Each structure stands twice: as C-alpha cells, then as structure tokens.
Image: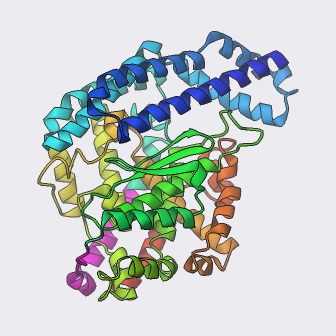
Amino acid sequence: MKESLDIISKQQKELSTFSGIGALLGWDQMTYMPKAGAAERSEQSALLSQLAHERVVDDTFWHHIQLLMKEDTFSKLKHRDQIIVKRLHTDVEKARKIPSDFVVRMAKTTTLAYQAWEEARAKQQFTVFAPHLEKIIALEKEYAGYISLPGHPYNSLLDDYEEGMTVDILKREFSYLKRELATLLNKITESETFATQKDLSLSLSSKKQEELCRTMMNTMLLPKEKTRLDVSTHPFTTSMANDDVRITTNFGRQQPLFAFFSTIHEAGHALYELGMPQDEYKDTVISDSPSLGMHESQSRFWENMIARSKPFWSYCYPLFKKTFSSAFKTIDFDTWYSYVNQVKPSLIRVEADELTYGLHVILRFELELALIDGSLSVTELPSAWNKKMHEYLRIEPTNDVDGVLQDMHWSGGSFGYFPTYLIGTVYASQLFDTLSLDNPVVKDDISQGNFTSILQWLRKHVHSYGRRLTAEEIMQKTCGEGLNSSTFVTYLKNKYSLLYGL
C-alpha cells in the first residue's frame, strides 16, 4: 500500500510540474512570443502534451491506482488518500480512452490555429481561420467518440469543463434564461430611461487605466509577489505554480471600462487559484477547481456582484474622479453608476452588460451544438452567428472581428467551455445571496473597499474544497441548492427595475 501511495504521489507531482510548464508556454505565446515562433511552439506544446498524457495513462500508474481502489485496501486508507485515489481513478480512467497520437495532433492543431485566429482578426477575414476550425471540430468529434458519454456527443465535451452537466440540463436552464432575459430586455428597451440614456464621452489614458487596474488588484488582496498583470488580445488567467498566477487585460478596446472590469474578472480567477488547497492536498489532483463553472463563479462574483454594485462605486467613484479629474468634472455619482450598469445590446461578449451577457453565451452554446452534431458547417457559421445576434439582441456585426472571430476559445479546441460562463454567473448570484445572509454588513464592507471578510468567506465556502467536492456539491453545501437560474433572474429584475423605473 505504501509503495502504491508513493508512486501516485510522485506521478501527481510530475503532472503538476508538466501543467505549470504548459501554462508558461501558453502564457508566453499569448503575450510576448514573436509571431514567427508559432510553428516551433506548436512542436514544443505537442511534445509536452504527449509526455504529460503518457504519464497520466501509464500502465504502472494505473495499476497502482487500481490496487488502491480494491475494497480491502481502500478501506484502510486515510480519508485524505481515499479522496485522492477516488478522484484519480475517475480522471485516469477517462484519460486512458484517449490515444497519445490524438493528444499530439490536437496540441499541434490548436497552437497553429491560435496564430491563424490572430491573423484572421488582423485581416478581418474568417476564411483565414476557417480551415483550422474545421480541423478542430473534426478532432472534437473524434474526442467525443473516445469518451462516448450517453446522449448528445456534446455531453462528452461539456463534461471536461463541467463534470456531470448535460445538454438536456443546459437546454432546460438556458431556455428559461433566454425567455426571461429577453422579456426583461424588451421592458428595458421600451422604457423612457432607455430612450434617453446616453454614452459618456470618455478618453481614459492607458497608463492611468493600468494604474487603476493595479490599485484594484491590491484592494482585492492579490499578493504582488505571487501575481503579475500583462496584456493580451483576449484577457485570461493562468497558473504556473501554487505561488505563480498570471493575469492579462487589454487597454486598447474602445469600451473605456473594459480593462478595469476584465482585470477584476481575471483577479477573481487568480484569487481562486491562490486559494486552492495547499496543505495536505498540495501537488495532488484535489488542488484544483471542480469545474470551470465554479471557477467562473469567482470571476463573475467579483466583476458583477461586487464591482457593478452601488456600494462598490461609493468606494471607487472617488478614485476614478481623482485619477481622471478632467473627464469627471461633469459626471456625478448617480450618472456614473447608471452608466456603469447601462443596458445596451452590443456585439462583443466581454463588453456586454450583465443582462445581455447571458444571451451572448446562449448563442455560442447553440452554435457549438450545431457544429458538433453536423447541422451547421464552418462555412455557414458567420451567417448563422449574425442571424442569431439579430434575433436575440437586434444588432448585427458588419465584420467577422466583431462577430464570429471575437473569442479565442475555438482556436484552442475549447468546445463545451462557453456554457460555463453562464453557469458561473448564476452560481455567483447564489453565492452572493448566501454571503449577504451570513454577513449582513457586507455592503458596508464593500463601500469602504474592505474585501477581507469577503475573501475569507470565499476561501472557507468555495476555495478550500478544491476538487474534494463537485461544483454541484459545493453549491448544495454552501447555498443549500444546486444551479438555480431563478436566483439570477430575480437579482436582475430587482436591479434593473430600479435603474430603469420598470
């Protein structure tokens, strides 16, 4: 038994190291790597992915996991080891279904596809990216065939990001959300407040935006010695090690608050990464998030439930006024708060308001389903995208950059990822409701820029579990219920009824 435990411990440590190296290669590719390095980087990434996969599916590793899973042995394990072995068995059994050569092909394809995606955006031509996307979709279908979960092939892709989630559950939840969001959007767009709302003419220098972003990272208690902020086309968070978590933003977007909110969003992810179990579960399969929906709940919690709230702007409005004094001479608090929470159907998901954001996600979910089941071809994708944008938001992109090319996810083969954004958004509303009950003065803390009690609550009720529990189990334990879209709808109705006089 000791030999088996030693072997799986060593293997997990190596896999954790491989993961960190892979994260570093990916971070470099999206931040500082010269474009001409893409071809060789694809070879590096492919080799690393192959080596990591071979260690996961190694027969000796699997043999010792199976030995530890035998009833007479498993019952003698410490509780900590039982949790690790059980989770490892599930993960490795799934990984062993995937051939090593597939891992290599996927890594090479996605590395080159990311560069093609950037080129397609620069040239505003979807056709540059289309052949790469076709290869990725073929690989995704192949992968779904290996995993072969019951029901829609998309279930096998979705399960990698949101364990236990299915197309049937999402169709039910998203159908309800689409109906409720559309109804509320119609009420808002028909209101007098909407008819008279105006954009604020703001020109905020990148340098001062960065100053505010770094100020917020400090306020959110992100330790400087464990994090850094850089720039990329699409903001992201990645973890190289337990004490090395990196986030990016983008200061070049037309939306003046994009960098600020994306930094807060990514900082929420980073806080979660830094809050993973590090004691007895360090360098084990447990020191990770149980799902991307849970991970996204942390970023959406900080971005929306905190940073778009009135108490937050009681604290942060003076900082903006001081930093951008000339721009804020004629902008009072109420005008600014209304502007920050303005509902305005827009083309770009990451720039969308809280209400319309969900419709952006549902659109992508529906398109992914169609691409995987073959009812939609890659050639038809741009027009299908534009048609749904017009149907859901009554606007339509005039170019592919503002449409089908706006997200990097498909270039990385991340089919099944998009739904987790909306799952996480719903989770965030449920978590904040529970936090407010547990800490009745939380809004006072927010208004003073004091986030210590909030972070401590998240550490205890979300972060500390790692993968000891599933996302569903964490929500049940913390909030007394699993995914409940009605909580999010109620939150939106209460908030926007006040803002738009409904």
Q: Is residue 141 visible?
A: no
| Front-most of residues 43 and 342 | 43
Q: Which quadrant of the figure contains the N terminus?
A: top right
Seen at 49% across and 29% down, the residue is 149
Q: Which residues are magenta?
A: 175-202
Question: Considering depth in this image, is 116 or 470 the residue closer to the camera?
Answer: 116
Please name whichever residue, 277 or 33, is drawn nearer the observer in this view of the structure.
33
Quarter of the image for residue 451 reads bottom right
The colour mode here is: rainbow
Q: Residue at x 27, y 33 (%)?
A: 35
The residue depicted at 31 percent of the width and 88 percent of the height is 329
| Residue nearest the viewer, comparing 493 with 339 | 339
Q: Residue 95, how many percent across, how many down?
A: 54, 22
Residue 200 part of the magenta segment:
yes
Does the magenta segment cover residue 228? Answer: no
Residue at 34% x, 57% y is: 350
Q: Residue furthest right?
A: 76
Where is the C terminus found, in terms of image quarters?
A: bottom left
Estimate the x, y position of residue 460 in percent, counting from the top left.
Answer: 71, 57
Q: Is residue 362 visible?
A: yes
The picture places residue 3, in percent across and down from the top left corner, at 81, 16
